[in-house]
Amino acid sequence: MVEQMKNSSDLLIGIDEITQYLCISLSLFKKFIKKGMPAVLIDTRWYAHKDNLDDYFKRITRVDSRMVEFDD
């Protein structure tokens, strides 16, 4: 089964594990979920894969350096 979910320790189960991994608050977790953060609610428990979260934050934090202004 896909290398046993690549590594079962890469699967985060529950809001506490996800927010601890990302170092974010519950309110920020809810905001990111509304913005499309890759996590799924099954029954009453949230699940997310570390690789998906890492890719998501790499994508949303990507900045075009040409748009950044530096003060001298």
Image: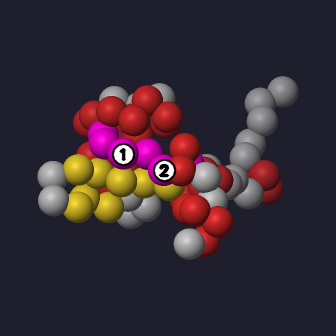
Q: Which mark is residue 11?
A: 2
Residue 14 inside the magenta-drawn segment:
yes
| Image position of 63 (left or right of 26) | right
**Inter-mark Cα distance, 2 to 1:** 6 Å
Circles 2 and 1: CB atoms closer than 8 Å: yes
Q: In this orientation, which residue lies closer to the viewer: 4 or 31?
A: 4
Residue at the location (38% across, 63% down)?
A: 36
Q: Which residues are magenta?
A: 10-15
Residue linked to disc 1? 13
Vertical side of 36 occupied by 30: above or below: above
Measured from the top left, where is residue 7 in percent x and y?
A: 61, 52
Structural crowding at the residue carrying mark 1, measured as other residues with C-alpha within 10 Å and reported as few (<14), some (14–19) or many (≥20): some
| Image position of 64 (left or right of 21) | right
| Image position of 13 (left or right of 6) | left
Measured from the top left, where is residue 72 in percent x and y?
A: 84, 27
Measured from the top left, where is residue 34 in percent x and y?
A: 29, 58
